[in-house]
Image (tube, grey):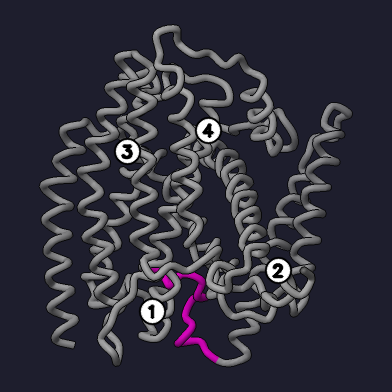
Amino acid sequence: MLDYITSYLSSNTTPGQAGNVFWALVYIMVVFGGVSVAVMAMNWLERKALAHFQIRLGPMRVGPHGLLQPIADAIKLLTKEDIVPSEADKFVFWLAPLIILCASFTVYIVVPFGPTHAITDLNIGILFMLGVSSLSVLGVVMAGWASNSHYPLIGALRSSAQMISYEVAMGLAVVSAILMTSLNATGTGTLSMIGIVQAQQSQQMWFLFKFFPLGFIAFGIFAIAMVAETNRAPFDLPEAESELTAGFHTEYSGLRWSLFMLGEYAAMIAVSSIAVTLWVGGWMRPFPNWLTGETWDLVFSLIPGFLFLGLAFIAFIGVARMPKHPYFRVQTIGLAGFGAVLGLIGLVLFAPPVRDRIQDIFWFCAKVAVFMYLYIWYRATFPRYRFDQLMRVGWKVLLPVSIGVLILTAIMGVLF
């Protein structure tokens, strides 16, 4: 048994490819736990960032600068009364949030955090991700129908129409990126998520800049479609609070409502991972072909440690600025402890074995974090679209442009 566990440590493949069930299970637990923590952090960051956009403070009461607010929210949702409408289809009502949650987390089976840091690598990985991520709309429709209420039903129908409208343009943009993977000596492309990143590595160019501006336009189409696919502002019509009173999850409360939120944020991270993999080089560090050599490799490898030390420094600045009053003593100690933890993590990241091992994971997560910030930025900036405007953008703008980009990409691939 010990040999079975340790044999994978010298492998250069993913646990799924190596057929090692133990490490595949470990990766699954790490990814599930990491995404769940990332959702909690994203919830806090979104509330704080939106507050600063609107010249407010955001969460401040629970823990220093509201750092414990996501934990307080989780406890509140777990202890709230779980209400099921008397006329609802109880089985479907119970099943809907689970389908959304499972669809959102199943996508991570093929997300490549590094050349070997993935649960498995399928030769149809991108099709698997697109197909599974699209299943979440089934949970939305089930939730709206099972509630036996008009507002949730309207929200569910909006979501299904929205998914159909933007899924086509998104798929064509993805095909454009897949065509770019075939520009090699053999002329064969790949649908493998790891293979797509390796194709960008071998061509020494992110697909975002390939056949400029075609790659950039395809990326823009995907970026717009992924916001609509995850029902986020300005395309959050399925749960439009001003007209549908939260839409498809109007009748949900407590734990079931929290599953919808967990699934939504997990789906946001998942589609951001797809965008990073297809167009922004996946786990590759910035400028891997321009800034080469051991010196530059060392410089970029030190960035994770300095980043955490910088965050620790910011935390200690907050400690110094805390009011010197007994009521703030607990918050001051808590923020100082949080800064100390960040500083300790930063120091550990300077150790060569750790530093070299986490490089690909760090750069992948950093790129995904940029997309997650853009979600917040969109929400604070753009007003919500009307439904007819949403349909017009999907069918009359994105679809024709994506078809044109696909045809031009194919022509450029044949010519060059």
Upstream in sequence: badge 4 or badge 2: 4
Which image quadrant for residue 64? Answer: top right
- What's under tag 4, amino acid-wise? Leu
Upstream in sequence: badge 1 or badge 3: 1
Mark 1 or mark 3: which is in front?
1
Q: Are marks 2 and 1 in contact (CB under 8 Å)?
A: no
Q: Point out which mark residue 259 bears.
A: 4
Under circle 1, the secondary element is: helix
Residue tagged 3: 234
Q: Residue at x 31, y 28 (%)?
A: 156
Q: Residues within 10 Å of mark 3 (few under 14, many from 20)?
A: many
**Disc 4 from disc 2: Cα separation:** 34 Å
**Disc 4 from disc 3: Cα separation:** 22 Å
Which image quadrant for residue 148? Answer: top left
**Disc 3 from disc 2: Cα separation:** 36 Å
Residue tagged 2: 305
Residue tagged 1: 200
Q: Is residue 190 left or right of residue 80?
A: left
Upstream in sequence: badge 4 or badge 3: 3
Mark 1 or mark 4: which is in front?
4
